[in-house]
Amino acid sequence: MANVPLAQALVYCSAQLLAQSACRSSACWCCVQLENGENLPTTNPLASQLLHVATTLAKQAGDMALDGRRNGLNNVQTKSTATDMVTEFDKASEVLIVQGLAVSRPDDAIIGEEGASHSGTTGITWHIDPIDGTTNFFYDLPTWAVSIGAVDEHGSLAGAVYIPALNEMFTAIRGGGAFCNGEPIHCNPLVDISKALVCTGFSYSAEQRTVQATRVSRFIHQVRDIRRFGAASIDMCFVACGRFDAYFEENLHSWDIAAGDLIAREAGCQTGDFSGNALRPAQVLVSNPNIFSQLGNLILTSSTSDR
């Protein structure tokens, strides 16, 4: 089925997953295309179906954007500030994903960064970031991703974060562990915060960026070092697989974290706000449980104003 249209492939794969506990057919287009398809957890048939759809669409959209970027950008605009960019491939990626969902999951709700949002009737909502890290994409840096998370009334149920330039697909379903290209991943068991490599991000607002930079300058000497990659979904996945020890940021959106939060938690991370309460887009902290509270306190005491 390698040349079967995407829409038909999604219908086939969804039918297989609903009829069985797993889609194991050698003719299955999704499993042939995605190396991690054979290793996906299948304890929840619905979650497995949703993840199969998410990985297929993330790979399709990401590869389309990667190929397009190699040919150059023709339409780059700004949104809230000069650092908040959108390209023709942000929009094309979201269109591709939404069209795929219209075929495979037509009654689900959608919340997309570029405006393709509508309500649904199934209790499942897809949170889509068609290109997370648009500035990196614009400058042809490899750290950008397609992030797709399926959320029910209990939170994220399935999530996929695909990094096309690195050919890495991070995946998770609730209760099924976290994976990168089909291999299980786990966060670092670090206990000494002074040895932590911490990643953060900055707001698009100039005023907020000043506050955040001041905060970082106050505690950088208390950790091993600071990184800023500029793509929340990647940052969370990199904590999940042990490349970073922690990540924190403020003023995000649901599409930034729906997939990455699940992947991080399934890899053994603790996620929440800086005070240890439930994760919310306004405040995001991800680390292993050993250093979570200490890092949260460090962030709060280094702040110049209450959050």
Image (cartoon, rainbow, N blue to C red):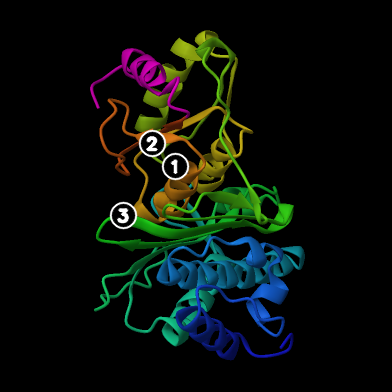
Residue 67 visible to the viewer: yes
Tag on residue 271? 2
Q: Quadrant of the N terminus?
A: bottom right
- How far apart are the two marked residues, 3 and 2, measured between alpha carbons? 13 Å
Q: Is residue 160 magenta?
A: no
Tag on residue 41? none
Residue 210 picture location, percent across and down: 41, 25
Which of the two labelled residues, at mark 1 and mark 2, occupies the earlier sequence position?
Answer: 1
| Start-end of magenta stretch | 288-307
Amino acid at circle 1 = Arg
Q: Quadrant of the C terminus?
A: top left
Residue position marked by numbered label 3 in the rendering: 155
Contact? badges 1 and 2 (CB < 8 Å): yes
Figure check: 194 above or below 21: above
Residue 93 picture location, percent across and down: 55, 70
Residue 51 picture location, percent across and down: 50, 66
Residue position marked by numbered label 1 in the rendering: 265
Figure check: 236 above or below 173: above
Q: Nearer the viewer, residue 110 or 270?
A: 270
